[in-house]
Amino acid sequence: MSSEASLSRLHINNVRNLHRVRLDQLKRVNVFHGANGSGKTSILESIHLLGMARSFRGGAKALITHGEQDCTVFGALAPGNTTLGVQRSRSGDVKIKVAGAPVRTVAELVEYLPLQVINADSFDLLTGSPGARRQYLDWGVFHVEHRFFEQWQRFQRSIKQRNKLLRRDKMPTDDLPVWTRELARSGEALSKYREAYFKLLTPRFKAIMSQLAPSLTGLELRFRRGWDKSLDFQGALDNSLAVDLEQGYTHVGPQRADVRIQIDGHLASETLSRGQQKLVVCGLKLAQGQLMSEADRGRCTYLVDDLPSELDGEHSALVCKLLASMKASVFITCVHQRDIEAVWPEQDLSETAMFHVEHGSVSQP
Ligand SMILES: Nc1ncnc2c1ncn2[C@@H]1O[C@H](COP(=O)(O)OP(=O)(O)OP(=O)(O)O)[C@@H](O)[C@H]1O
């Protein structure tokens, strides 16, 4: 399905300090304002739970209100009124429903409500390990190229098998070449999808950054696929066989891929100021949303926690202007209502709903 839809209703039960919240009048842009600890981030977390069956901070148990056995989030998408429901229990049980019917895997859920989170942890994209950047890239490929997931699963299966054989036997067994060939095929295909997506993403990112931070002209993204570029994947696996056997795992391949984010040849994470880093993170995430809608894969929903932190008024306004022009569905938190009113494009405020959050209760003026 294409996720044209955005969230129109949201019911939350027992997520952190949100015992019972009913939001039946959501708009395209929804602002949650309130004091520290009132429950604003928990609302974004609840939407994340609805779209991905997990939180974006901490484990599932921390999410459930103290003293309760489970938490539940229910949502409806508009247009179409498809309903989604996710329940997580202290026992570790996860129940997911789409349109009232149980689904078995999270993969079946995530395509309905594609989510992008912009919060303090998003800096990981620049400063964290390559894993964070691979996850970022794969999110985009998954939502734009639906055949990607099957290749990704094949790749995960074959690398697991090959590593198991490498760990067990210091000498090559008959099974090893079989799994190595399977790994080479699935890894090559997976990497091609990533490369094709990356080629589409880079110009969008550059165009967005030229609006958000025109002075950062030397910004560059480079895709590293995870093995020597003069070889195909099978050749690289053949070359590393001795080391792989010695150390008991596969050293080269898409599991080592990375996106290097550089400015004038230096790592952006080591050069840019905190505010500039946040703009790059916003640029990366906005580029993915733009690409998704251009590829006719629908709209993604942005969960933005405390946008004004690290950004000055002018740059906050630029991010808001881009979000508004993309017609993205947005859930955004801030301390005071005026923090967002001051930076959100005035002509778009009619499509904006304001909610006040206080001690786990949400009210609308
Ligand atoms: N499992 C839990 N059960 C009950 N309350 C919890 C649980 N986990 C966290 N809380 C409380 O829930 C509240 C909601 O926190 P949340 O992070 O959503 O606040 P916030 O409005 O985003 O605050 P800030 O502006 O400081 O970021 C906090 O007061 C926190 O102490």
Image (cartoon, grey):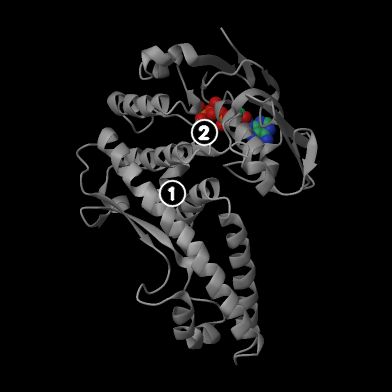
User: Tag 2's secondary structure?
Assistant: loop
> Where residue 290 sits in the image (x, y, percent)?
42, 37
Residue at the spot x=59%, y=85% of the render?
Answer: 177
Residue at the spot x=29%, y=39% of the render?
Answer: 207
User: Tag 1's secondary structure?
Assistant: helix
The image quarter containing residue 115 is top right
The reply, left or right, for residue 233 in relation to residue 206 is: right
Residue 178 badge: none
> Where residue 110 sits in the image (x, y, percent)?
63, 43
The reply, left or right, for residue 134 in relation to residue 78 is: left
Residue at the spot x=62%, y=17% of the render?
Answer: 362
Height in image: 18 above or below 231?
Answer: above
- The answer to whether any part of residue 343 appears in the image is yes
Height in image: 348 above or below 78?
Answer: above
Cα–Cα span, label 1 and label 2: 24 Å
- The answer to whether any part of residue 53 appears in the image is no
> Where residue 163 sits in the image (x, y, percent)?
60, 77
Residue type highlighted by circle 1: Asp
Q: According to the image, label 1 marks what residue? A: 124
**Label 2, residues with CA under 10 Å away: few <14, some 14-19, many ≥20:** many
Residue 299 badge: 2
Nearer-the-camera pick, 4 or 135: 4
Q: Residue furthest top?
A: 365
Residue type highlighted by circle 2: Arg
> Where residue 317 sits in the image (x, y, percent)?
33, 24
Q: Nearer the viewer, mark 1 or mark 2?
A: 2
| Quarter of the image where ligand 1 sits | top right
Viewport quadrant of the N terminus: top right
